[in-house]
Every structure is written in structure tokens, then in C-alpha cells.
């Protein structure tokens, strides 16, 4: 963290503003003024609440707590969303930790530091070791058959994501304001995760995403009119986690495509989600767009003008057999904003000209045309012809995920209800044998 960089107050947090830099002594530190974390003591461990709170207090300062009650019929969906899973999964954590009221706890580490840490799922991430030790002690204090009856955040990003989901953006922002004034209090909350009944507007959805996800809004109609048409395209760090955060369900049976739907303004809205590394475009271009996106014409984070213009040109030239007049008009409007000469005007009659333009820009930026992992994003022009037109092509083809039969059949097997009980019993047996 550079000395001149201003740290953010908790109430100023937005996911795209979070940064980690090397600390003065060792490890890393984020750019927040306070290091806040959350714990959930699930129903199965509530009989040991005092012992668990004592274990947390040994490492951290407890600031506030409140009892949370979900609708029991929605507990499966709530758990899947909180843990970033496909909402069609039939396995539910409630089978192991209960679906009744749980205790939500906010704690602070007054002497924080972050190191690379391997968590129980095998991921190596920047983690506060004090929080990791507190969670381990809390789980041991719970003394339950299932070892994961206490959940916690390991990082700042996870604290804000999970808390916004559990409390809702408005209630959570009020809590952050109280934390800054030193009078944090929480009343009992009886509601499901944010967005369980859909989103009242795109403004509400954008506010929620600012606390939870890295993303970039690529294109689509985000008016709240009931006659809006078309899909909304988003670039994300992880499309499944993004879908869980907004409460979106897959439109197809497979487990790899990015087609989802959720309710916004009372209308079923289709989302087409891309993620960094899916090879729809060069992953380096995806990463660049994700980290440089900012608020511009809408409430969502959007790519910079240059990226928006050439991404739409890429879409028209290489992914559509015939471009709509709406897309061509949008492209012309962005061309005028960039100040590009008339040579850059595009119509639907000369694909070669459009491909030569986008190819020239890709070469200038050091990007290549990749082979998408998802067939829906396949190029409409053969690679041989692209090469003859001077297009920069990647050398290696990517594995096509959507035709993997195992991935396609897993959702079907997961929906066979009579398999749930033996799978759950087998999982508990394996945990005991460990």
C-alpha cells in the first residue's frame, strides 16, 4: 500500500475498488480502514453459542450480532446462493447444519494482516490468519458431528459479499454507518437472501453487485420498461458465483453454458454471462476490461469506450451471421464518440472490411482471436479465411466444455430425489472416517 493512497471507510466499499498491496513487514494488506469479518453460527451449533463466541473473542473483537431466520422452504436455495453453487443442486447444507434460525456475528481484527492460505476446499487465497484460527476454534467449540457448523469470511471481499446477501444492501449499509460511529446494533432479521423475490429495478441490482462481484456490463437494454427485449451480457470473474449472487438460474440443463435468468422489475430477464478464461475473446482482453471498467452511462460498471467499441465490432464481424440494425447503429454512435474516420463505418454487406479492422486493432494490442469453450460463441467465419485476411489467431484450440457428457448429465442425476439420502449418509460416514 503506497503511503499516499487513501484508505476506504467501510461505508465507501465497492468490490472493484478493493486492492491488496505488500505490507511493510511481511504479508499483504488491503486498502480499507477497518478489517471486518462475519460469522454464521448455524442452527445445529446454537446450543454451544457462548463457547463459540468465546473462541471468536479470543482472536477478534465482536462488534454486533443478530439472529437471522430464513423461510424453511427456501433454505436450500439460500445456502446454494451463499456458497456460490448452481441453484438447481438438490444437496442442501441444511441437511447437515439445520434450516432454523442462526446467529450472524460481525467481528473486527484490530491488527490485521493477510497471507496466502489454503482453505478447507483446497483453494489458496489471501486470507487473514487470525480469522482462520478463530473459525477453526469456533468449529471445534461447536462439538457437532458435521465439522462445518460455523461459517465465516476469510477476506474483506467475502465479508461484504456474504453480509450484503444475508442482510440486504440497505440494512447492511446502515450497519456499516453504525460501525463507523461506534454504535453498531442489529435487530432480528426474518427474511431470505437479497433478491430472493427478484429485483425491484436495475438500480437495486447494480447497488447490490457493487458490494459483491467483479463484473463488467457489456451490452443490453436495462430500462425498466416491460417491453424491453434481448439478453443482458455481463463479463464476470466467475459466472456461477455471479449467478448465485443475483439469484439467477440456468436456462439449459448443462453445467457449462452461461445462459441464466432472473426477475428484474417483475420481468423474467435473460442474462448471458461470460467469465475470464472462457476464450470467447482473448483472456488478456477480458482481464483488461474487467479491471478497467467504471460507471459511465448507466449504474453498472462498463468497459472503457475503446473496449466497448471494438468488442461490439468483434461481435458483429465474427460472431453474428447477420448484424441487427440496432447493433450497427450502436456501433456507429460509438465510432463517432471515438473520433474514428469514415473508413471505420460498417454495414452488413462487407464482413471482410469489418474483420480487417478488428484484426488490426487486436494486433496493435497484442491480442489474438481464440477458440471459444462454449459452442454458442463459435466464430461464424472459418479460421482458414480469417488467416487469409490477416487475422491474429491463437495457436491452440480450447477444449469445448459444453459437449462433455459427464458435465451435461450431472444436473439430471442431481435432480433424482431418492439419491439424496444415501449420498448424504455416505458423505457423513466419510467425514467420520477422516
Image: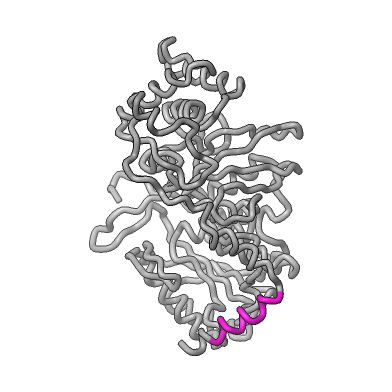
Looking at the rendered structure, the number of numbered marks drawn on it comes to: 0
Query: Does residue 252 appear anywhere in the picture?
Result: yes
Give the residue displayed 71% in from the left and 76% down from the top.
Answer: 418
Query: Quick one: 303 or 352, which is closer to the camera?
Result: 352
Image quadrant in which you'd find residue 183: bottom right
Q: 52 or 267, which lies in front?
A: 267
Rendered location of residue 398, percent (x, y): 40, 48
Q: Residue at x 41, y 11 (%)?
A: 343
Name the residue at 31% across, 59% down. 28
In terms of image quadrants, where is residue 393?
A: top left
Magenta stretch: helix, strand or loop mostly: helix
Residue 244 occupies quadrant: bottom right
Relative height, residue 128 to residue 29 (above, below): below
- Report x, y in % for residue 169: 61, 52
- Magenta region: which residues? 418-429
Residue under the point 69% across and 64% down: 189
Amino acid at each position: 500500500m503506497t503511503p499516499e493512497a487513501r484508505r476506504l471507510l467501510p461505508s465507501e466499499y465497492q468490490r472493484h475498488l478493493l486492492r491488496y498491496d505488500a505490507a511493510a513487514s511481511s504479508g499483504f494488506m488491503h486498502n480499507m480502514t477497518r478489517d471486518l469479518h462475519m460469522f454464521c453460527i448455524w442452527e445445529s451449533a446454537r446450543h454451544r453459542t457462548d463457547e463459540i463466541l468465546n473462541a471468536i473473542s479470543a482472536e477478534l473483537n465482536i462488534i454486533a450480532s443478530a439472529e437471522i431466520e430464513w423461510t424453511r422452504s427456501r433454505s436450500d436455495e439460500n445456502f446454494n446462493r451463499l456458497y456460490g453453487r448452481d441453484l438447481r443442486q438438490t444437496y442442501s447444507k441444511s441437511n447437515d447444519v439445520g434450516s432454523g434460525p442462526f446467529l450472524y456475528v460481525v467481528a473486527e481484527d484490530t491488527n490485521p494482516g493477510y497471507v496466502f492460505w489454503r482453505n478447507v476446499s483446497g483453494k489458496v487465497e489471501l486470507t487473514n490468519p487470525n480469522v482462520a484460527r478463530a473459525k477453526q476454534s469456533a468449529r471445534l467449540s461447536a462439538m457437532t458431528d458435521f465439522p462445518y457448523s460455523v461459517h465465516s469470511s476469510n477476506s474483506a471481499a467475502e465479508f461484504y459479499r456474504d453480509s450484503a446477501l444475508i442482510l440486504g444492501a440497505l440494512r447492511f449499509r446502515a450497519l456499516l454507518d453504525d460501525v463507523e460511529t461506534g454504535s453498531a446494533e442489529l435487530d432480528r432479521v426474518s427474511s431470505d437472501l437479497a433478491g430472493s423475490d427478484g429485483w425491484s429495478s436495475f438500480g437495486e441490482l447494480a447497488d447490490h453487485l457493487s458490494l459483491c462481484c467483479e463484473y463488467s456490463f457489456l451490452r443490453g437494454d436495462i430500462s425498466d420498461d416491460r417491453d424491453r427485449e434481448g439478453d443482458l451480457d455481463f463479463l464476470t470473474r466467475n459466472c456461477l458465483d455471479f449467478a448465485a449472487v443475483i439469484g439467477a438460474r440456468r436456462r439449459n440443463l448443462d453445467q457449462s453454458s452461461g445462459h441464466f435468468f432472473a426477475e428484474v422489475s417483475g420481468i423474467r430477464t435473460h442474462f448471458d454471462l461470460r467469465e475470464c478464461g472462457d476464450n470467447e475473446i482473448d483472456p488478456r482482453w477480458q482481464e483488461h476490461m474487467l479491471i478497467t471498467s467504471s460507471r459511465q452511462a448507466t449504474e453498472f460498471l462498463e468497459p472503457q469506450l475503446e473496449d466497448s467499441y471494438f468488442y461490439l465490432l468483434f461481435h458483429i464481424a465474427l460472431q453474428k451471421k447477420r448484424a441487427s440494425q440496432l447493433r450497427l447503429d450502436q456501433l456507429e454512435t460509438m465510432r463517432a464518440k471515438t473520433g474514428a474516420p469514415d473508413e471505420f463505418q460498417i454495414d452488413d454487406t462487407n464482413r471482410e472490411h469489418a474483420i480487417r479492422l478488428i484484426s488490426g486493432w487486436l494486433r496493435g494490442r497484442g491480442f489474438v482471436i481464440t477458440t471459444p469453450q462454449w459452442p454458442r460463441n463459435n466464430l461464424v467465419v472459418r479460421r482458414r479465411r480469417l488467416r487469409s485476411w490477416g487475422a491474429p489467431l491463437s495457436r491452440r484450440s480450447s477444449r469445448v466444455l459444453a459437449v462433455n457428457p459427464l458435465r451435461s448429465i450431472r444436473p439430471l442425476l442431481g435432480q433424482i430425489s431418492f439419491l439424496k439420502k444415501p449420498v448424504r449418509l455416505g458423505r457423513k460416514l466419510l467425514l467420520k472416517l477422516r
